[in-house]
Structures are given as C-alpha cells and as structure tokens.
Image (cartoon, rainbow, N blue to C red):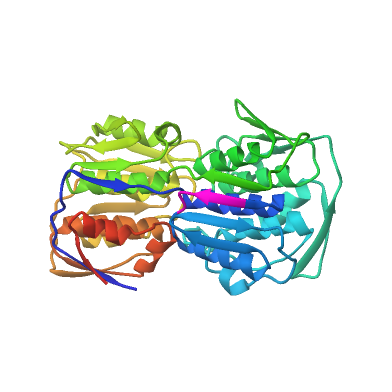
Amino acid sequence: MNIVVKPSKLKSDKTIKVLGHKHSFVQLVAATIIFNTRCTILNVPKTDDTDILCKLIIKLGGKAGFKNNTVYLDTRSMKYKRIDAQLCNKIHGALYFIFALAIRFHRFYVVPTGGCNISTKGERPCNHLIDILNSFGVTHKSNKTEYSWKTCKKTKFVQNIKRFSDTMFCLTGEKVSSATKLCILAAIGTRHTKTIIKNYYFRTDVYDLLNFAKLCGIEIKQINNRLVIDTENKNIPDNMVYTLSDCQSEVMTFITLAIVNNIKLTIRVTNLDVLQNILYPELKILHEMGVNLVLKNNKIIVPKQKQLSGANIRITHKGIQSDHQPFMALLLSFANDKSVIKEMVWRSRFAYVPELNKLGYSIKKHSNKIIIRPYKHNILQTDINLNATDTRAAAVLCIAAIKSGTTVKITNIENITRGYDGFINNLIKLGAKVSK
C-alpha cells in the first residue's frame, strides 16, 4: 500500500489518545496460553499482531474476539496441532506464541516467524528458543520440524541474560530483549519453583508480563539487576482482566511529530507514572536537548519548541530504546549542532537514512553509527518517492514528509499497521493532507 503526503500545516492545540503497547499484548497472549485460562485484555491497539494472534488461537481450537480495543481470550479448549506457518511468518510475535505452545503441550513445530526486517543478518533471531528451553533443564527429541520434550523439576534455577548479549560488559545485540521475555515465560510455565534471571532487559512488555504473572499468585522481586520469580504459591484465576500499559513508542512518535512540525500537542495516556519510568532515558535526553515537556494528570503536553541542542547517543538495552533511534535522528536534525547516534542493539537499523536524505536531511552512516547535521531544507525536486522498510521508519518518513513542504509518495506504508492503530487517521485529524 502507498500513501501520498501533500504540503500540510498541522493544527495546534489538539489532543491524541495513545493505546496500549502491542509487544505487551504478545506477551500476555503467550502467558494466557501457558496458564490455560481465560483473559480479558483492555486498551489493546488493533495491529497485525492483535489480529493474527487471535486467528492463531482460533485455529488451534481456542476462542478470541476483538471489540472496542478489548480482546477476549479463552485458551482452555486449545489443542495441539500443526501451527499455521503462513500466519506466523507475518509477525515476529509468533515466536512467543510458539514458545507458549511448547511449554503448555511439551511439543511444538518449528516455523519461521516474521516482523520488520531490521536484523543485521536480514532476519529476526529465533534459534535461541531451543537454547532457552535446553537451559531450563529441558530434554528434547526432534525430527527437524517437530520437537517433543520433558523437563525435570528444580528447586532453584539461575539464568544470566548476558550470555545472549554481544558483549559481557553491557547488554547489546539482537537477542537480549526476546531472551529476557522467553526466560520469564519459561520461569512461570515450567516446573521450577524459583528462577533467578540476572541482567534482564526491562521495558513496558516485561513490566506488563511480570504484573500479569503477579495476578496468578506468582511472587516476583526485582533486586538490583536480578529478577526473582517464585511460583510456589501460583493460583491462576479462571478469568483474568488486565489493562495494557501505554505504548512508549507511540508516545515518542507523537512527541516527534509535534516538535518537528512546531505545534502544541497533548498526548493522553492511561498511566503516566509507568510511562515516565519506562521512558526515563528518552525524557532525560529530550530535556538536555531543550525540549520542555509538561507531564501531569495522565497527559504529556508538547509545547511549541525553540532551537534544539545536539547530542551524542549510544543505543543499548539500558538506555534509549532501539525503536526510538529513528525518532531521535529526525529530532536531532533540527538541532543547532552536529549529533551522533551509535546503535548497539539492531546495528543495521538505518534503512530510513537514505530516504530522509532525499528530503534534504544530512545524515551519514558509518558502520553502526550515524552522524547528523542540521537540516537545511534544500530539496531539489518536487515529487519524491520514499520506501518505508519497517514500522518506525514508516512513521518517521510520514512525519518528515509532512514537514517537507512538497508532495511525497511513501511505499510499503502497510508497515504502519504492525505497530499503530489509526496512525494515518490521527495525522489527518491533525490537518495532514494524506491519501492512499
């Protein structure tokens, strides 16, 4: 699908409502399968993951329905059978779905999973799924496409996420995030009484997964860099209800939109306290750049901005999120000095850079680093074609296209539906001239 963005002037003093984090939804679906129960999940965005995960549950005999940003799940009648490979290949969230089936049924089929193509090697890593099962004491048999396994019960089990990192000095690389979530799912689903996960990754999806597990009587303690999970008193309710935390990436998207297009914008969220904690690194660097956000009463108010300052940013699992790297690059293009971003998670996540440069931006890539110079708005042509390679790149290109003052065609805009619910409609609501 393609869109055309024509020269637009956005309206100021408008309000946008942010929905829940789609990666959190993926984790809660997996946990609901593991717990063999019913669940009602509120504040859910309608994305590809939402739709496909519900279809996968239905295909395996469960029940799933979506209405008014609420998803109703009943996994109790799910049966083990070959999973729909075509559906799994459309979303990366299928990795956790397959893992949940493995824990619940002790058998699973290996199928390729999809998602945005942002990996250094051209595909998202998934081979550590078997590695993590093995590390939890699982013994398995395989006939290349199907695994069956059993696990031995341990009183105490220790897992260190640093073994999935590119370096032992800090959390970097493509596997840390998924390894943390897979280890938590294994901890709450296998027979071990107590699991200690060292050097874990912590973002909104992990926060929601842990809180969801607590509703089942699972005791969870966060002590420095250790996560202690005790399942001894696990008691799973017959029908759980959970509200997804706000999507921090959608918040960053609209903060960027407001600053770049110099409008005042109010972003309404569900739980500002949680969001501030998760987004602390981003909010800190934005403040240092001269962005004076107002955070109160579950609202983030983005005032009209003056000149921004440059910054040097290093993307790691403990700092600014890799998903937000494209937004920071766009924002720093409007700074008064040269800036540098070094990417240590998804090291090749720069496909949006040549596309922005077509709009007159000055961003140069060197290995896993980009150097950003102030935007001069020196576009040499009137009709520009851009290619959106992934979800966040698509959002960034939309924002930049609105700012450009010329007609811009963006291809592969369906990547937007991987992570946003009604994004294009929100742009139109704010006054953007966008047509499919």
Quadrant, the N terminus: bottom left
Whether 200 is among the magenta residues is no
Position above or below: 126 against 17: below
Relative to 434, residue 316 above or below: above
* Identity of the residue furthest to the front in this view: 238
- The residue segment tinted magenta is 39-44
Q: Quadrant of residue 163?
A: top right
Tell which of 142 and 237 is nearer to you.
237
- 111 with respect to 353 (left or right): right
Count up the numbered dots. Answer: 0
Image location of residue 115, percent across then percent down = 50, 62
Relative to residue 47, is residue 54 drawn left or right? right
Tell me what residue is drawn at x 30 percent, y 72 percent: 2
Direction from residue 259 to residue 279 in the image, left or right: right
Q: Nearer the viewer, residue 61 or 136?
A: 61
- Residue 227: percent from the left, percent from the top? 65, 32
The residue sitting at 30% across, 42% down in the picture is 267
